[in-house]
Image (spheres, rainbow, N blue to C red):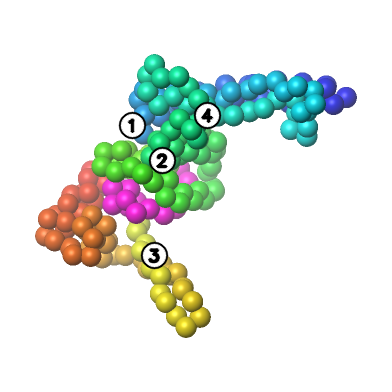
């Protein structure tokens, strides 16, 4: 009976893997991973390793450049690449997220500039379909949001308390300028922050 059920699981797993590979592959170019590939690798296990998950082992493999040999995604991809692969994977797994809330915590880790802007754009499009909350240190990503809240930590006698503060238009510009320039906000940083926000609005 175990083998019968395991065979059904294996067949379903193969179909799901093919769909997932296609979905993730479609997400990679918009995230500036044009030459990358994603593959769900399924291998049969020896009988002594059969278990509650079936008779197979599943792992995600990736190649980050055209012609590069694929390998385990956590060994092949750099920090910034891995963050984008995980975003593509998350989006693909949430193909029907309507009515749900998605939370991304520093999914833009290790990226900046045009790549960060691409990540922000994808998150923004995701936000048109379902409520999406993003924790980020990237001004390019922060500027893509419909709303902006600042998270601050305050030291008290009992420890550290984290709080959030919604930002209006002017405060948001200042915060993005601070994210760009640091504590010493310059006129150039404010101009760049305004440009990022205006670009979001088209």
Q: Report the mark closest to the observer, 1 or 2.
A: 2
Of the residues under marks 3 and 4, which one precedes in the sequence? 4
- Give the residue displayed 47% in from the left and 46% down from the top: 130
- Regarding residue 194, the answer to whether it shows in the image is no
Look at the numbered discs 4 and 1 and tell me whether their residues touch, using CB distance below 8 Å.
no
Instruction: Judge the density around disc 2: few (<14), some (14-19), many (≥20) Cα neighbours within 10 Å.
Output: some
For residue 22, side relative to residue 109 (left or right): right
Look at the numbered discs 2 and 3 and tell me whether their residues touch, using CB distance below 8 Å.
no
Counting the numbered discs, the total is: 4
Task: Tell whether position 97 is magenta.
Answer: no
Q: In this view, does 36 lie above or below 103?
A: above
Look at the numbered discs 1 and 3 and tell me whether their residues touch, using CB distance below 8 Å.
no
Find disc 2 in the rendering and name its residue: 79
Look at the numbered discs 1 and 2 and tell me whether their residues touch, using CB distance below 8 Å.
no
**What residue span does the magenta drawing correspond to?**
127-146
What percent of the width, then of the height, locates residue 62? 48, 26
What percent of the width, then of the height, locates residue 133? 44, 53
What percent of the width, then of the height, locates residue 124? 37, 44
- Give the residue displayed 83% in from the left and 22% down from the top: 3
- The residues tagged by marks 2 and 4 sit, at their Cα atoms, a distance apart of 14 Å
- The residues tagged by marks 3 and 4 sit, at their Cα atoms, a distance apart of 35 Å
Quadrant containing the C terminus is: top left
For residue 97, side relative to residue 168 (left or right): right
Find disc 3 in the rendering and name its residue: 151
Find disc 1 in the rendering and name its residue: 32
- The residues tagged by marks 1 and 2 sit, at their Cα atoms, a distance apart of 14 Å
- Disc 4 element: strand
């Amino acid at each position: 009976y175990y083998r019968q059920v395991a065979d059904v699981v294996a067949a379903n797993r193969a179909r799901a893997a093919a769909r997932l590979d296609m979905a993730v592959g479609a997400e990679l170019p918009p995230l500036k991973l044009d030459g990358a590939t994603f593959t769900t690798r399924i291998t049969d296990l020896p009988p002594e390793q059969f278990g509650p998950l079936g008779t197979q082992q599943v792992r995600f493999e990736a190649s980050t450049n055209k012609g590069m040999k694929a390998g385990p995604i956590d060994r092949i991809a750099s920090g910034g690449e891995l963050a984008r692969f995980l975003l593509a994977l998350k989006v693909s797994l949430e193909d029907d997220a309507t009515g749900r809330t998605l939370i991304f915590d520093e999914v833009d880790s290790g990226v900046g500039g045009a790549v960060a802007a691409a990540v922000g754009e994808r998150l923004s499009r995701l936000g048109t379909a379902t409520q999406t909350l993003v924790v980020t240190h990237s001004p390019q990503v922060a500027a893509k949001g419909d709303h902006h809240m600042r998270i601050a930590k305050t030291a008290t006698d009992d420890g550290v308390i984290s709080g959030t503060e919604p930002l209006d238009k002017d405060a948001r510009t200042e915060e993005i300028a601070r994210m760009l320039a640091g504590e010493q906000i310059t006129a150039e940083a404010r101009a760049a922050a305004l440009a990022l926000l205006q670009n979001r609005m088209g």
